[in-house]
Image (cartoon, helix red, strand yellow):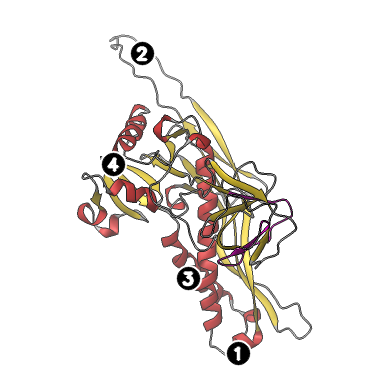
Amino acid sequence: MGTSVLPDALRVIYSAELEFTARPMQVFDQFAERRNEHAMHKGQTAVWTIFRQMAPTIGALIENQDVDTQQIQDFQVQLSVTEYGNAVGTTEKLDLLSYFGPISSIVRDLLAPQMASTLDRVARNAAWAGAPKSFAGGRANRAALTDADVANIDLVKQSAHRLLMQKIRPTGTGYMAVVHPSVIYDLREDPLWEDAGKYSDPSRLATGEVGRIFGVRFAESHDARLPNAGAVQAQTTLTGSHAFNSLILTVASTTGINVGDELTLFSSAQSTPDGTGTTEENVIVKTVDSGTQLTLQYATAVAHQNGDKVRKGLDVHPMMFMGAEKAYAKSIVQAPEVRVALPTDKLRRMNYIGWYTLLGYGTVRDWAYLVVEAAASQDGKYQFGF
């Protein structure tokens, strides 16, 4: 049976496998308040109505008088929904040579991790964009951070206290934070750190939860990092367009760039790499071939345009602290599912299998969380940029 005649029942099975495989990889997504707006259509928005707490009525009641009523205060927040998806090609030969294996493998090994990475970064960017921000070491902004401004117990205490002063209730076991593994490394140096296995049943842990300190539970995510987004150490531009799978970069200058450096490639329209660019990618330098040419450890995963920026700088690690109230939300019109396209070639041998969803993320309670940006003592560079 080819993918072109895939029964609806099997599509549902593969969609379930897509979701099941992706779920353990989505850290930011799990903390979003969910709403299914099935009545919405493409281009419309989901509306959250937020109610303020009522003022205390401390005056005593008078026996022969009716009670004065209070009015309820509320405001609304809107989230726009957007289409997301991806597809990969398959052939009839691939289907014929294996009994459902190729489709299942494509869904499990390629599409599910790619979908999880996509949606978790969308959730991350929406959450970070709406959060109140501060910077370790009392710095004024991201560019002012130094490599000494790392996470420590005092920063955790201050963040928890700020949430408490906002009257944000902790969860049953404390506040929650999403951070990068390099931040966890720095916090584990403190003698008060507790590994998650010592204080909780594994079935009750949040996805990615690794430990706690000072009543704050920590979930780690590799996406809680913005490579080269801090103080600039070297920056240049691409000279000429570079297609997908390029192993050599031609740049205006290699000054300040060394073998083993992790560089961020990002659009010329962006002032800094902030994780929101659709072609933003990180690469590792294998050799510096000349004053204008770099060979990479591994080829690029997306195409880059002439004039795109190439940057080396301080890595920034945003730490997101939350309480029991959901600070950001997710509106789902169409849950992620597997889609199989009909063949379009003359012999009906080639088609595509992919995933599709229609949803949106956004902040609904901006007082209910905060983001603190810091450096880290350990190098967190990755061999592959995605």
Q: Which mark is residue 96?
A: 1
Q: Is residue 155 left or right of residue 381?
A: left
Alpha carbon distance from label 1 to label 4: 53 Å
Task: Give the mark, 1 or 4, whose residue is nearer the N terminus.
Answer: 1
Q: Secondary structure at mark 4?
A: loop
Cβ atoms at labels 4 and 3 below 8 Å apart: no
Decide which of 15, 352 is in the foreground and name it: 352
Q: How far from the left and from the top, in percent, is residue 217?
A: 31, 46
Res 319 quadrant in image: top left
**Quadrant location, the N terminus:** bottom right
Q: How far from the left and from the top, in percent, is residue 117?
A: 52, 59
Q: In this orientation, does residue 1 appear?
A: no
Task: Give the mark, 2 or 4, whose residue is nearer the N terminus.
Answer: 2
* Residue type for callout 1: Leu
Decide which of 13, 276 is in the foreground and name it: 276
* Residue type for callout 2: Asp
Q: Which residue is mark 4?
A: 174
Main secondary structure found in the magenta portion:
loop
Alpha carbon distance from label 2 to label 3: 60 Å
Task: Give the mark, 2 or 3, whose residue is nearer the N terminus.
Answer: 3
Q: In this orientation, does residue 142 appear?
A: yes
Q: Which residues are magenta?
A: 291-311
Alpha carbon distance from label 1 to label 2: 80 Å
Residue placed farthest to the front in the image? 290
Cβ atoms at labels 2 and 4 below 8 Å apart: no
Alpha carbon distance from label 4 to label 3: 33 Å
